[in-house]
Amino acid sequence: MAGATFLSAPTLLGPRGLPSVSPPARRHAHIQVCCQAKAGGSEACEEALRLRRRDLIGGCFGATVGLEIAEASTRSTGVAAAADLIERRQRSEFQSSIKSTLTAAIEAKPELVPSLLTLALNDAITYDKATKTGGPNGSIRLSAEISRPENSGLSAALDLLVEAKKEIDSYSKGGPLSFADLIQIAASQALKKTFLDAAIAKTGGNQEKGRTLYSAYGSSGQWGFFDKIFGREDAQEPDPEGRVPQWGSASVQEMKDKFIAVGLGPRQVAVMSAFFGPDQAATEEKLIADPDCRPWVEKYQRSRETVSRTDYEVDLITAVTKLSYLGQKINYEAYTYPKQKINLGKLKL
C-alpha cells in the first residue's frame, strides 16, 4: 500500500525456545498495524503507535506480548546457546586429551592393539535386545567378567587402560572418565593406529609420507558420530554369562548369530575380522568359507589393497560406532564443569 507505514508483530511461533501457540491463534500469527502516512494522518499514526498494551492484546491477539516473549526468549536462548557451546568445547578438549594419552600408551605397547579391539567388542556384544541389558557399559573391567574364558588374554589390555585412566582422571576437570567410554575410545585409537600403519607400509615404511597419505586419503574424518557418543555410564555389576562366544573356537554360524542378535550381520562380522583375535588372516580364512561372509571378506580384502582403503575403513568405523552405543543412554553433559568467574573488582589495572 503506497504511502503507508506498517508495524509488524511477529508470530509467537519463533525459533527454538519460544513458546508455541494454540491452533486458533496461528490464523493470527502475523499481524500488521497500518497507519496512513498521508497528509494530516500523522496524528492517527502516532496514536496507533501509542496503543495501550490491553488494546493491542484485544485487537491484535497478543502481538505485544509476543514481542516481549520473543525478546526475552532471544536473550535466554542466546545464553543457553553460549552455555551449550562452552560445554561442547569442554567435552571436545577433554576427549582430545584422552586420545593423546591413549595414543601414547598404545604406541608404547603396540602388541596390545588386537587385545584392545577384542576388549571393546566383548564389552559391547553382551547387549541383549529382549531385556535391553548389557552393551558397552564397562562391566568387563569387573573381575567376575574379565576372568571368564571368552576374555582370556585380555587382562594386559585392561591393565594398560587402568594406568591410562589414572593419568586421564588426574587432569579431568569434569569428573573421572568412565571405563565404558575409556574402553571404546581406546579401541578407536588402536584402530586408527592400524590404519596409519597400513598407510605407512604403502609408502615403503616412510613415516612422513605415510602420515601424509593417511591425511589425504584415509578415513580420519569419518569418526564424527563416534566422537559424539561420549558419556556412557559404568555398570556396577557384571553382565550375565553366556552372551559372548569364544571367538577363536566359535563357528562362523555362531559368530553370525551373535551379531544378528544385536542388530548387525555377516557384513559386520567380515569387516570386524581384526577384532576376533590377533591373527586376522586366519579369521578371514575361516569366514571366507561361509557363503554369507565370503563376498564381504573379498570386498574388504580388495579394499585394503587400494591406496585409500575407503570401503574397508569406512564400513569398519560404521560397525564399531554401532557397537559402541548398544543399549546405552548417553549423558551429553558428562565431563562438563562450571567456568570460573572472574571478579573484575579484584583486577589490577
Image: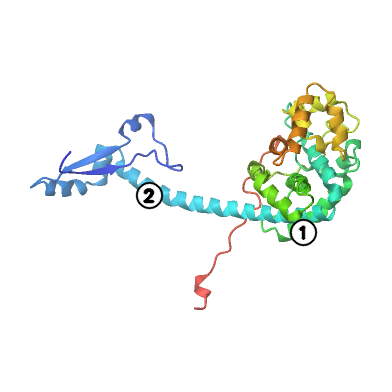
User: In the picture provided, is 152 more to the left or to the right than 193?
Assistant: right
Q: Dot 2: within a 10 Å radius of its alpha carbon, few (fewer than 14), some, or many (20 or more) residues?
A: few
User: On the image, which quarter does residue 114 sit in?
Assistant: top right
| Mark 1 lies on residue | 167
| Mark 2 lies on residue | 71
- Farthest left residue? 40
Q: Residue at x 83, y 26 (%)?
A: 288
Q: Residue at x 39, y 38 (%)?
A: 13
Relative image position of residue 11 (x, y in whole percent): 34, 39
| Amino acid on which disc 2 is placed | Glu
Q: Secondary structure at mark 2?
A: helix
Relative image position of residue 246 (x, y in whole percent): 88, 33
N-terminal-most mark, 1 or 2: 2
Relative image position of residue 298 (x, y in whole percent): 77, 29
Q: Secondary structure at mark 1?
A: helix
User: In the picture provided, is 159 more to the left or to the right than 217?
Assistant: right
Q: Evaluate whether residue 230 shows in this view.
A: no
Can you tell which of label 1 and label 2 is closer to the viewer?
A: 1
| Amino acid on which disc 1 is placed | Glu
User: On the image, which quarter does residue 327 sit in?
Assistant: top right
Q: Evaluate whether residue 48 shows in this view.
A: yes
* Residue placed most toward the observer, 210 or 341: 210
